[in-house]
Amino acid sequence: MKLYNTLTRKLEEFKPINPEEVKIYTCGPTVYNFPHVGNYTSYIYWDLLVRTLKANGYGVKRVLNLTDVGHLTSDADEGEDKLEKGAKREGKTVWEIADYYSNYFLENYEKLNLTQPDVVARATDYIAEDEKLVDILTEKGFTYETADGVYFDTSKFAKYPDFARLDLDHLKAGARVDFNTEKRNVSDFALWKFIKPGEDHAMRWDYLGRPGYPGWHIECATIIHEELGETIDIHTGGIDHIPVHHTNEIAESECAFDKKMCNYWLHCNFITIDGEKVSKSLGNTYTLEQLEEQSYMPLDFKMWVLQGHFQGTRNFSFADLSAAKSRRLNWRNKAAAVYQLGQTRKTSVCDQILEALNENLNSPEAFSIIDTNELNYEDWKFVDELFGLGLIDGIESVPDFVKRLMSERDEARKNKDFAVADEIRDQLADNNYTVKDTPEGPVWQFMV
């Protein structure tokens, strides 16, 4: 199995620390608003990663975090905490906002049939551990204190620019100097933010004798260390995490524990709409519910996502989503047909499909193999296990009345009573089934 590693900018053979427990960490959402379809893209691809690892016989332990404090409206250290922003927008407490949007995200996670993480970690459950990590970094000389918080001194970590190939001199030349004149370096970042007297911030914990809250980046370093250990196999996220969030995670973790944080870093690309990044600020977002209102299932969207490679750029359109919906329905009906008629192909294509995925999760190539080969029912079950597209849902549990109507229609056709046969076809259609007459005999098919 080969994966493109952001750390080395190379396609590398995957060599786990322990094949029985591949440790994976996925950066989760900031739970302050409704996630849009672009937000779910990465989770769909990392679900494919988990499924592919398991298909190769690896055991997996995966942690997904939920950011419910500390993520400011800027990915750096400026602006309002996003949870505070959500609370003001809706007239609720920050805790109510965090609970509501955490549950909302996880419900849609299930709608997309994504593999459940072994641990779902809320940032606010790790505050004491965050403080301990800041203490460790302070004791080792990597921090300094300003009026508004405790900062990580990036000049003390020589490897800081390496992961994102940062040009720190260029950053310094273009930096704003009016935000925090106490910062020693433009790339320094807050480990812990102090709440100023009179500042409205509901989430607060006492640390160093003052109320405050953790910086965004430290939650991931803390959760990884607590739940997975000092070095993990795979860390996943979006490409926007590379220059700031993941770079800062590496600095915190490796300086605190003197160990390599992660062996393989995987990053997926954005999807766009009309050529622009999907963004709430641009107002070009769709939720899964909005897609459902237009008769698209969440799994149709998942199909559309997996038709492209995780590193590629994709432009979303409803025309392409409709095509993905039709492709998924076609696959479901192919699986239903071979289930009813028996196996028509003795050799399996499962190895070919898995081989495509083992080449850096090449789902478009895997889909091409599926489209151009005749799969038996066991193949279709394997495909559904790999991609989680709900292809065989309802096939083995088709209602008895469908079987009865199919039998009655077959009898009517034998008796040349085509009016009754058409009447039965209409009854099936009323229940979202249709009939396809094949050389091997009639089969029922899904209509949606």
Image (cartoon, rainbow, N blue to C red):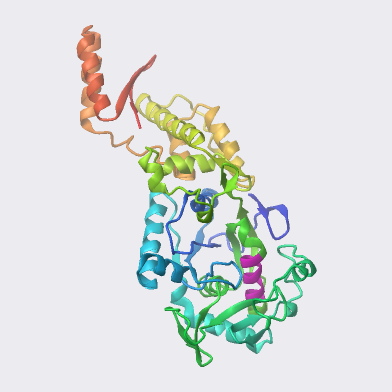
Q: Closest to the observer: 14 or 431?
A: 431
* Tag count: 0
Quadrant of the frame with the C terminus: top left
Please indicate whether residue 155 sits to the left or right of residue 230 in the image: right
Query: In which image quadrant can residue 365 be found?
Result: top right
- Along the viewing direction, whichever of 236 and 416 lies nearer the viewer: 236
Q: Nearer the viewer, residue 206 or 425?
A: 206
Q: Which residues are magenta?
A: 244-254
Percent from the top left, x then y, of residue 297?
Answer: 39, 41
**Residue 411 showing in the rendered view:** no
* Residue 258: % across, % down: 67, 78
**Residue in view at x 55 percent, y 51 percent:** 49
Magenta span has 250?
A: yes
Q: x, y percentage for residue 81?
A: 50, 71
Is residue 336 inside the magenta stretch?
Answer: no
Where is residue 98 drawn, in percent x and y? Answer: 40, 68
Q: Residue at x 50, y 90 (%)?
A: 210
Main SS category, magenta section: helix
**Of residues 295 and 434, which is closer to you in this image?**
295
- The residue shown at (49%, 87%) is 197
Above or below, 137 relative to 289: below
Is 429 situated above or below 16? Answer: above
Which residue is farthest top?
416
Instruction: Tell me where residue 178 sits by quadrant.
Output: bottom right
- Where is 372 relative to 171, above or below? above
Farthest residue to the right: give it: 169
Q: Is residue 53 visible?
A: yes
- Residue lying farthest bottom? 209
Query: From the viewer's perspective, is 294 left or right of 140?
Result: left
Q: Residue at x 23, y 14 (%)?
A: 421
